[in-house]
Amino acid sequence: MAQCSRVVSGEAIRVLWEDMDDIEPLLKVIPALQVTASIRSGIPVRVYNVTRPLNAEDWTRFHFYSRHIRSLRYEFDGTNDRAISLLSQYSLGPLLSSLHELKWLVTRHHHSSGPPSVEFFMTQFLPLAGTALRSLSIHGYFGHSEEDRNFLVAFLHMSPQRCPKIECLQLDGLRSRMCSGLSFVGRFQQLKYLDLGHSLDPPTFDMPALLAMSKLPRLCQLKFLAVYGENLTPASLEPGFPSLTSLHICDGDLVGVKLLLGAISSASLTRCSIEMLGNGTAGEYLACLAAIATKASSLVDLNFSCTLQCDGWELREAGREICRILSGQSFLRLSRLAISHGQASSTSQIAPPYAVGLGLAWPSLTSLNLQGTLFTFSIPALSTFASNCPSLQTLTLPSLDVISNDVWTTPEIPILSHGLRILRVYYRDGIISDVAFAGILDRLFPNLQRVRSDQENRLCLRSCDEERS
């Protein structure tokens, strides 16, 4: 289209070059940059060479197209090396002056011959990273020698000065032993989104990092943090993170999580995911849960998963206290809730007053997952809870107590016009036939579309249909 009409050629070229999945089309506009095929360590590679010094005509053609590029996905696989660093020797500024988004990927193809050194990465990356950059994503592992560490520390430290307008930063694969901490993030004054990705050795979230990030005025999302109490000092904490709306903690302990939650002053925290925490005591868990409850007015999505190390009596007492804390706060906007304590061998039955309180505390709840929790419902408590939580669509329970149905006959079970559609129960405590169980469920939840029950993972929906017929 760009070649068919002068009227639309400008817009067509802009659309064609605006979002690039590879930089090779841009390299081909320079005749002096030639590529030859070669084999290195058994891997086919493209070797770039400059056949003559680049002149003004070469750069005019290059800049004509490069000025349209706003987003670039650069896949560094070890087969396309040296091109960027070669071109940068002939340019005094960034090669892509209008680039707003850069996604840099080190693929497994390159890892077959070992990860690239950080120094080599910098020779390819820095010529692309200009002051206009808004979004930066780096995925993959680099070399891990002491020299690599020195280069990486310098690169991270200087990145806020090279790219001061960064709003979105993703660093997938960054390892603790390869960097001196995360405090450099606090110098990205325009930062809104930070994603530290998956790593077996996540970087340390320590006091310098917390204090630096907490002062960022626009930071709204934190993802894949590892938070340990031993790295934080309670006496030094001050309210911060004024704009935070989403928090994801993927590793750490309950003490660290509680301290971080206590430092968040934002009244707009809508999503909170805390998972894969190490062993903690019941007291630490309850203190952390109380800190979460202080954000009840704004939370929409909450996932809280932790393994508790307690004996049977402590677990039962903790289960009752958890019900008390959750039912004592009004989570008016909460739509999705998932809680796990890593144990379901010792549970507390939810008392009817708590069943009422939990239902009233979550008026907007549509999805509830209690798999692996310390408490369970009886049929009467489930009926009471459901009648006070009318918006619930999906419910997952570790177990359901049906023993009390020996004295509570089916005709006495209230008929609810509840909208629950999906029910998962992994264990039924008591002996009851599938048909009788289906009859109870049909009276409570006549709109069920899927029911999964029992240790054997049998489907009971057929029994529900037979009961209705």
Image: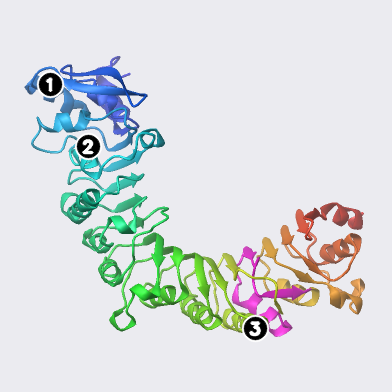
Kindly identify which residue carries mark 1: 58
Q: Quadrant of residue 58?
A: top left
Q: Quadrant of residue 89?
A: top left
Q: Quadrant of residue 32?
A: top left
Residue 40 rendering spot, x and y as whole percentages:
31, 25
Residue 318 rendering spot, x and y as whole percentages:
61, 82
- On screen, residue 108 above or below 183: above
Kindly identify which residue carries mark 2: 124
Q: Is residue 286 visible in this depiction of the protein?
A: yes
Q: CA distance from mark 3 to mark 1?
A: 74 Å
Magenta stretch in the rendered image: 350-378
Residue 343 rendering spot, x and y as whole percentages:
64, 70
Kindly identify which residue carries mark 3: 320
The three-letter amino acid code for the residue at tag 2 is Gln
The three-letter amino acid code for the residue at tag 3 is Arg
Question: Which of labels 1 and 2 is toward the front?
Answer: 2
Residue 418 rendering spot, x and y as whole percentages:
74, 65
